Image (cartoon, rainbow, N blue to C red):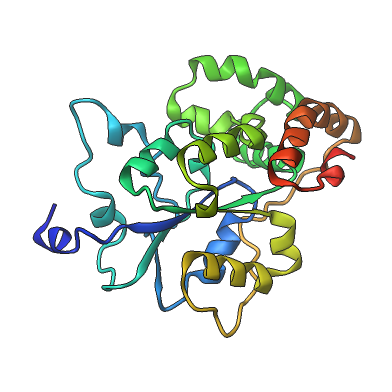
Amino acid sequence: MTAEGAARGAQRVGFVIGGAQKAGTTALAWMIVDHPKLMIAMGKEAHWFDDERNFRRGAGPDSTYEERYFAGAEEGATLFDATPSYLWWPRAPERIRAYNPAMRWVVLLRDPVERAYSHWNMARSRGTEDLGFVGAVAAEAERMRTADPDRAQRISYFSRGLYAHQVRRLWSLFPRDQTLILRSERLDADPAGVVGEVLEFVGVEPLAEVEPQRRNVGSYAAPIDPEERRVVRAMYEKDIRDLERLLGWDLSDWLR
């Protein structure tokens, strides 16, 4: 660590926008990024805690988290990292607890079928996915058995939407009052209200004005086929009902 880093050693990242991918995390990050008391990780998604190269036994990263992503942070700024795979990557939450047990988590959850289809469509448009939507979802478990970490991130269409499992894991490591879990539909419908709730949760004053953002909105070659939606929704039904019980939410619209 540099002398500057050592001098700032107590300054730790205070919150993460930790999930879920394709649920509005980028839009939320860019709605709060200009807050004078906040500093986002350079590049927005640091991927520090889900990069296995940073945690290999006998080898370590060539710099600290703060040095690599928060150089020049002003004293007193609240640092934050918007990496949506932290909620899903199995070891990321425990690594984050080891780094900062007081970390606050902001989590956006989107209809898992819509989320999976958006993820698959992104891969398809980039030329990294040859299978159709249902075929890719059905093949995921077997593919993941042999996937390296980079490929696992790309093909995890279905497992990222198993939110109840991920929330339970998060709550086994962090007190519930350190987590703010929101529906992404609320961010679409009331961006100013959601931003105000997030800023209050992380302990900074509200913004005078919030400019709504739409980020990483891809175009679809075709909308999801109703029969494919039905098939994938049935695969998620148990987890969605479990999530309803966990969060006290009515998710009947996700089950239609």
- At a point 44% along the width and 39% down the height, the residue shown is 93
Residue 130 in view in this figure: yes
Would residue 241 appear left or right of 151 to someone viewing this image?
right
- At a point 65% along the width and 35% down the height, the residue shown is 164
Residue 45 position (above or below residue 232):
below
* Quarter of the picture holding the C terminus: top right
Residue 238 falls in which quadrant of the image? top right
Q: Which residue lies furthest to the left in this view?
A: 3
Residue 43 in view in this figure: no
Q: Residue furthest bottom?
A: 208
Expressed as whole percent of the image width and height from the top left, the position of residue 174 reads 47, 44
Expressed as whole percent of the image width and height from the top left, the position of residue 208 reads 57, 85
Would residue 222 appear left or right of 42 to someone viewing this image?
right
Residue 5 position (above or below residue 253):
below
**207 and 201: which is toward the camera:** 201
Expressed as whole percent of the image width and height from the top left, the position of residue 166 reads 58, 35
Would residue 79 appear left or right of 190 to someone viewing this image?
left
- At a point 73% along the width and 33% down the height, the residue shown is 242
- At a point 62% along the width and 37% down the height, the residue shown is 123
**81 and 118: which is toward the camera:** 81
Would residue 233 appear left or right of 101 to someone viewing this image?
right
**78 and 26: which is toward the camera:** 78
Residue 21 position (above or below residue 53):
below
| Total residue callouts | 0
